Amino acid sequence: RFDDGLAGGEGGFHICTGWLIESLVLAGRLREAEALFADFAALAGPTGTLSEQYCPVERMALGNLPQAYSHIAVINAAVALAAAKERP
């Protein structure tokens, strides 16, 4: 909404994708969570690092690279999925 003086737009934050995956797991929607996790993990660059944000329109990483919070999101989502699979 406001001009920050920087060129370019803003993408979606990877950490929010991780939270969405965890929410899907908690809601029992494991297939959706697994599919989104696979797409999420595929966004890592050739060195295995994730940026802060991703622009799905331009299909490019945005923001800080690497971004620790993005990696924490992947780890937390993976742990949530693994724990859900172990439950009866």
Image (cartoon, helix red, strand yellow):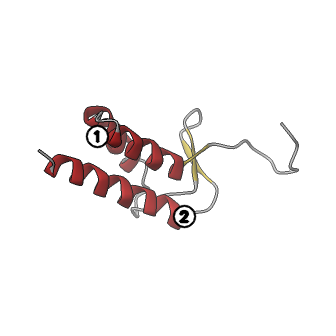
The disc placed on residue 72 is none
- Residue at 38% across, 46% down: 22
Which residue is labeled 1 in the image? Answer: 34
> In the visual, does 73 lie left or right of 2?
left
> In the visual, does 4 lie left or right of 26?
right
Please state the horizontal and vertical placement of residue 23, each as a whole percent of the image.
41, 42
Pointers 2 and 1 in contact (C-beta within 8 Å):
no
Q: Nearer the viewer, residue 28 or 58?
A: 28
Q: Quadrant of residue 39?
A: top left
Please state the horizontal and vertical placement of residue 74, each as a whole percent of the image.
39, 56
Q: Quadrant of the N terminus?
A: top right
Choose the circle earlier in sequence order: 2 or 1.
1
Q: Is residue 62 above or below residue 33?
A: below
The kind of residue on which mark 1 rests is Glu
Please state the horizontal and vertical placement of residue 67, each as a whole percent of the image.
54, 64
Q: Quadrant of the C terminus?
A: top left
- Residue at 86% across, 49% down: 4
Pair 2/1: label in front:
1
> In the visual, does 28 lie left or right of 70?
left
- Residue at 45% across, 42% down: 20
Q: Secondary structure at mark 1?
A: helix
Q: Quadrant of residue 30?
A: top left
- Residue at 32% across, 42% down: 25
The residue at the far front in this view is 88
Q: Secondary structure at mark 2?
A: loop
How packed is label 1: few (under 14 Cα within 10 Å), some, or many (20 or more)? Answer: some
> For the image shown, how many numbered marks are present on the structure?
2
Q: CA distance from mark 2 to mark 1?
A: 22 Å
Which residue is labeled 2 in the image? Answer: 67
